[in-house]
Image (cartoon, rainbow, N blue to C red):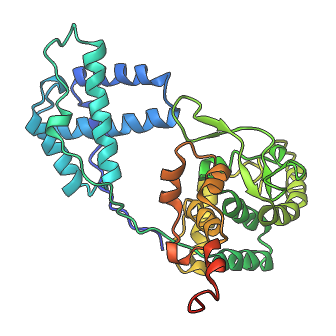
């Protein structure tokens, strides 16, 4: 029951090999300049997106040098992205930002080679609303803890521990696999002993080569009971396969599990949840669950360690105001009609 996302591939090794050498050179110089400032994944995504742009340019604009493209040709590429490639608003905005940044790089660093070049993106490419193309999955506590009980009943302790990792932290999928056994100390708590805090910082999403380094909080009573059941099983598997590393989640041969491995678990959970499942939905889950329990947005922002607090809370809180726990409600009970 995977979320449906349209995908059309317009690049190929053959097309990439035919990209105008001048454009290839500009692309490599741009990526080299960005490499010191951006993560490896960001650079990989930049390269992929530029290949899409220049393969389109090869087919539709006779492989024209980038610096000679006209406004209408840029506009037509982005129209193609929306209409033929079915880009979401976010995908469109990401590509628009990249092509604009690429243009600025030429102006800032290569103005002697291309003195007449201008950044045409703002004039040629209109902005579009960031409307998601995939339906958001909202899961309730009874679904999460029902799945927990089912996995425990079936003896799938490691899967259950990973489920509780996501449900207790809201960590992104890559972050969740960076939290290792050396980072968990049940005595290293925060917020009135209700949360565990990792003993070390881990890389999270953010600008720069290393992203943001920060500790993560996990709801103690959600994560710890199943984690304690998993640890001796993990130790036995590691010993049996003569492996030594601190990854929390592992394959049957003792090697660290991969993103593909945990995605396989999450895909299987769909049968029980009866909805599309993906790791990021647990980020919505923890924020919404804390909101239902009456936690303030300021508290939730502190738990999640968001830099742009209020904006992020609005994105991840799926609870309508009428369904929230308001302290004012208790004050109003029994007072109406008594004046």
Residue 191, given in percent of the width and then of the height, sits at 78, 53
Left or right of residue 339, residue 35 in this image: left
Q: Which quarter of the picture shows residue 222?
A: bottom right
Q: Which quarter of the picture shows residue 104?
A: top left
Residue 145, given in percent of the width and then of the height, sits at 71, 76
Left or right of residue 23, residue 131 in this image: right
Residue 6, given in percent of the width and then of the height, sits at 32, 61
The answer to whether residue 157 of the structure is visible from this angle is yes
Camera-nearest residue between 298 and 185: 298
Residue drawn at x 69%, y 52% as measured from the top left: 257
Relative vertical location of residue 230 with respect to residue 33 in this rendering, above or below: below
Q: Residue furthest front?
A: 339
Relative vertical location of residue 163 with respect to residue 273 in this rendering, above or below: above
Q: Residue furthest top?
A: 112
Q: How many marks?
A: 0
Camera-nearest residue between 188 and 95: 188
Camera-nearest residue between 16 and 232: 232
Relative vertical location of residue 126 with respect to residue 163 in this rendering, above or below: above
Q: Residue furthest bottom?
A: 337
Relative vertical location of residue 25 with respect to residue 61 in this rendering, above or below: above
Residue drawn at x 69%, y 45% as measured from the top left: 178
Residue 202, given in percent of the width and then of the height, sits at 69, 39
Residue drawn at x 77%, y 38% as measured from the top left: 200
Q: Which quarter of the picture shows residue 270?
A: bottom right
The answer to whether residue 61 of the structure is visible from this angle is no
Location of the C terminus by quadrant is bottom right
Residue drawn at x 72%, y 59% as measured from the top left: 165
């Amino acid at each position: 029951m995977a979320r449906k996302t349209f995908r059309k591939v317009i690049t190929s090794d053959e097309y990439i090999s035919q990209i105008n050498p001048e454009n290839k050179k500009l692309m490599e110089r741009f990526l080299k300049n960005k490499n010191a400032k951006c993560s490896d994944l960001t650079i990989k995504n930049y390269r992929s997106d530029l290949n899409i742009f220049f393969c389109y340019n090869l087919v539709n604009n006779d492989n024209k040098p980038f610096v000679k493209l006209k406004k209408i040709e840029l506009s037509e590429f982005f129209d193609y992205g929306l209409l033929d490639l079915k880009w979401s608003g976010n995908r469109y905005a990401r590509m628009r930002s990249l092509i604009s940044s690429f243009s600025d790089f030429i102006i800032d660093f290569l103005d002697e080679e291309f003195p007449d070049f201008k950044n045409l993106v703002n004039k040629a490419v209109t902005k579009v609303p960031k409307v998601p193309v995939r339906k958001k999955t909202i899961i309730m506590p009874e679904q999460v803890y029902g799945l927990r009980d089912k996995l425990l009943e079936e003896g799938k302790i490691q899967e259950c521990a990973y489920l509780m990792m996501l449900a207790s932290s809201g960590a992104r999928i890559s972050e969740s696999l960076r939290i290792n056994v050396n980072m968990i100390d049940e005595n290293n708590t925060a917020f009135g002993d209700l949360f565990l805090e990792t003993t070390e910082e881990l890389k999270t999403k953010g600008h720069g080569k290393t992203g943001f380094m920060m500790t993560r909080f996990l709801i103690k009573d959600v994560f710890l009971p199943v984690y304690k059941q998993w640890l001796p099983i993990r130790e036995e598997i590691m010993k049996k396969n003569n492996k030594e590393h601190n990854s929390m989640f592992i394959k049957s041969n003792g090697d660290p599990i991969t993103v593909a491995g945990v995605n396989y678990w999450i895909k299987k959970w769909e049968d029980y949840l009866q909805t599309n499942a993906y790791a990021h939905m647990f980020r919505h889950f923890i924020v919404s669950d804390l909101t239902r329990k009456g936690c303030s947005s300021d508290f939730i922002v502190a738990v999640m360690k968001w830099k742009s607090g209020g904006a992020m809370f609005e994105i991840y809180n799926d609870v309508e105001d009428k369904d929230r726990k308001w302290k004012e409600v208790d004050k109003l009970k029994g007072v109406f009609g008594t004046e």
